[in-house]
Amino acid sequence: MPPSLLLDLQTLLVTIALVTPRALVCLTILPGFSLRTLTGMARTGAALAVALPAALPTFEFVRHTPPDVFTAVVLVFKETLLGGMLGVLLALPIWVVQSIGSILDSQRSPIQIQANNQSMDQDASALGAMLVQAVVLLMIQAGLFVALARILIESYGSWPVFHLLPPFEPGHFDVVVKRFGEFLWYVLVYGGPVLIPLVMVDFGFAMVGVFASNLQVSFASSPIKSLLGMFILLVYWPTLSHYVGGDFAHMLDLAASLLQVGPGPRAPAEPLP
């Protein structure tokens, strides 16, 4: 085998190692592409497909200025952190829905029913797993995952793999921290219409339990809370899915604005020395 071909093969392997972590970590965090949903080969193939447009400029960079081991490790670590930030940021609305389902399951029954689904987390409740699957299906039908792939692909142009410093000001991270802080607020707002009636049922049975001390309040209220909770969830589901889809689209816009994806001026990134 010619030495030049071996050198190009080595450059290609280094390029794949540099461009894959961002998309791979982001897809691993998102429900629908997680470790329990897709096999390692399928998930890696999806990440390589997303990162493929960035392979050519990265290949040229590695061929002309081969990075040493320390620089390559730093770049891979940077790509992993960036993919984790994007994945967590985009998964927040879906985690809100899963939290609402888990809280509703814990309220309507004293016995927590775990999801018998290998694609969901072991600690996810049955209703939380069902709501996550429904939301992911709605997002796929609405084309939001196509927009996610577009933002991931264009993020390689805004913040290339071989640029260590971000193309935005450090103050923009305050926006990301603020979105993380709003997680509990969204759980309370979105789950309020479902959880408040169940709390009122508990309060009513607690008042009855004052006068009937032999009544097992928790078990007596479970059937009523189950029927009431499921009825309210069925009525409330169109509104909940609409706002969760809107929040996911807003997260896509936020990620795009942080990385300055789309039309408009882009701040130049500082290349590695």
Image: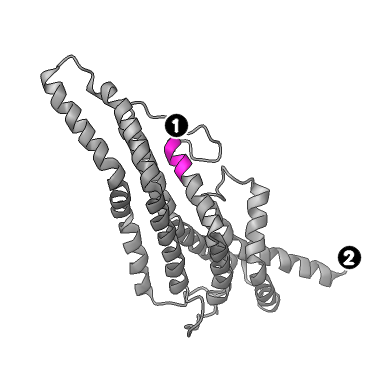
Kind of residue indicated by mark 1? Gln
Q: In this view, does 12 lie above or below 168?
A: above
| Secondary structure beneath label 1 | loop
In the image: residue 156, left or right of residue 174: right
Left or right of 217, for residue 38:
right
Q: Nearer the viewer, residue 23 or 33?
A: 33
Tell me if mark 1 has few (under 14), some (14-19) or many (20+) residues whose alpha carbon lies within 10 angstroms of its own: some
Residue that badge 1 annotates: 114
Q: Nearer the viewer, residue 239 or 169?
A: 239
Position in image of residue 131 (x %, y %) = 45, 44
Q: Residue at point 47% right, 40% down? A: 129
Query: Residue 1: which numbered mark, if any?
Result: 2
Residue ID at (43%, 72%) = 258
Which x, y percent locates residue 146? 57, 63
Quick check: 8 above or below 212? below
CA separation in Å, label 1 and label 2:
56 Å
Q: Give the range drawn in magenta.
A: 124-131
Residue 179 lies in what quarter of the image? bottom left
Furthest-right residue in this view: 1
Query: What's the residue at 44%, 73% (across, down)?
Result: 257
User: Which quadrant holds the N terminus?
Assistant: bottom right
Place residue 176 in its image quadrant. Answer: bottom left
Q: Residues within 10 Å of mark 2 (few under 14, many from 20)?
A: few
Please tell me which residue lies in front, 89 or 191: 191
Expressed as whole percent of the image width and height from the top left, the position of residue 90 reads 45, 59
**Nearest to N terminus: mark 1 or mark 2:** 2
- Is the residue 168 above or below the residue 98 in the image? below
Residue, far left: 211
